[in-house]
Amino acid sequence: MIKTMTFAILHFSVAFTITYLLTGSVVIGGAVALIEPAVNTVVFYFHEKVWKGIESKNALEAVST
C-alpha cells in the first residue's frame, strides 16, 4: 500500500509540475493533477474489461484448436 501511495504522490506531482510549467497557473496545474488521474482510472477500468475479453477469446481459440 505504501508503494501505491508514493506512486500516487509522484503521479500528482508530475501532472502538476508539467502543467504548471506549461501554463504558469497553480490553479490549472492543481486541477489537472486531480482530474488526469481520475480520468486515467476510468480509462484503465475499461481497458481491463476489453483486455480480459481478448484474453478469454484467445483462450477459447487455443482450446478449440
Image (cartoon, rainbow, N blue to C red):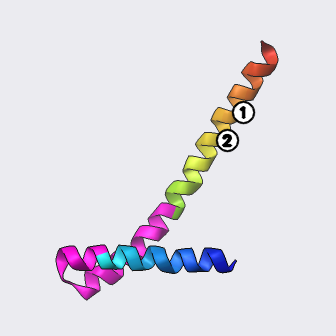
Please tell me how crowded label 2 is: few (under 14), some (14-19), or many (20+) other residues with Cα within 10 Å.
few
**Where's the C terminus, which quadrant?**
top right
Residue 33: x %, y % from top left:
39, 77
Which label belongs to residue 56? Answer: 1
Residue 31, disc:
none
Q: Secondary structure at mark 2?
A: helix
Q: Amino acid at mark 2?
A: Lys
When the figure is inspected, residue 63 is found, relative to residue 1, above or below; the finding is: above
Q: Secondary structure at mark 1?
A: helix
User: Residue at point 75% right, 28% down?
Assistant: 59
Q: Is residue 47 above or below residue 20?
A: above
Res 17 → quadrant? bottom left
Which segment did they paint magenta?
Answer: 18-40
Q: Which residue is mark 2?
A: 52
Residue at 38 percent across and 74 percent down: it is 14
- Amino acid type of the residue tagged 1 in the rendering: Ser
Percent across and percent down for residue 10 are 48, 77
Decide: few, some or many residues near mark 1? Use Cα within 10 Å; few <14, some 14-19, many ≥20. few
